Image (cartoon, rainbow, N blue to C red):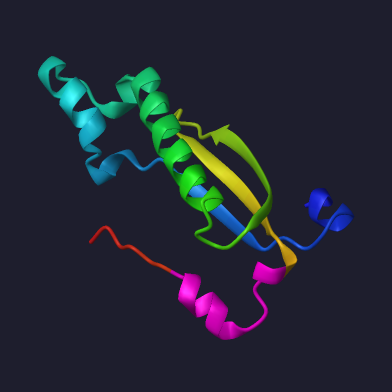
Amino acid sequence: MQIGKKFQKISCQVCFICYIFSNLIEIDIHIAYIGQQAVDCPDLVAHVFYQKQQALLKIICDGYFGAVAVLVYTIEYQKRGLPHMHLLIFLENQDKIHIVQQVDALMYFRSNS
């Protein structure tokens, strides 16, 4: 948050989590034949998380929210060993969010049920 104080206001904040109970096909394929669960293979979970993280960053840098000035992220691990990423996105001035309709256009919710 200190970065936002020093440079400019944060445009978007994203929390990207690894949720192993969502039947990630990338993990299930590799562990099904040995009878393990995803939490038993932290290296595989971290590798799949990294691939999905890079895909998300590419989508954002390609202009999903607008022209990106700065991206700042940190990756943390939960007690169960699952990674998650906190991402701060600073957009260029012409693409900053100013009205409610812009927020509504960016919002997306996906339920697992």
Residue 47 vs 25, above or below: the answer is above
Q: Which residue is most to the right?
A: 6
Residue at (86, 57) in percent of width and height: 5
Residue at (36, 43) in percent of width and height: 19
Residue at (52, 52) in percent of width and height: 60
Q: Position of residue 74 (x, y in %)?
A: 63, 38
Q: Is residue 32 left or right of residue 68?
A: left
Residue 16 vs 52, above or below: the answer is below
Residue at (45, 31) in percent of width and height: 50
Q: Position of residue 48 (x, y in %)?
A: 36, 30
Residue 85 vs 44, above or below: the answer is below
Q: Is residue 109 left or right of residue 95?
A: left
Magenta region, residue range: 94-107
The C terminus sits in image quarter:
bottom left
Q: Is residue 63 left or right of residue 50?
A: right
Q: Position of residue 71 (x, y in %)?
A: 66, 46
Give yes or no for residue 45 being in the magenta stretch: no
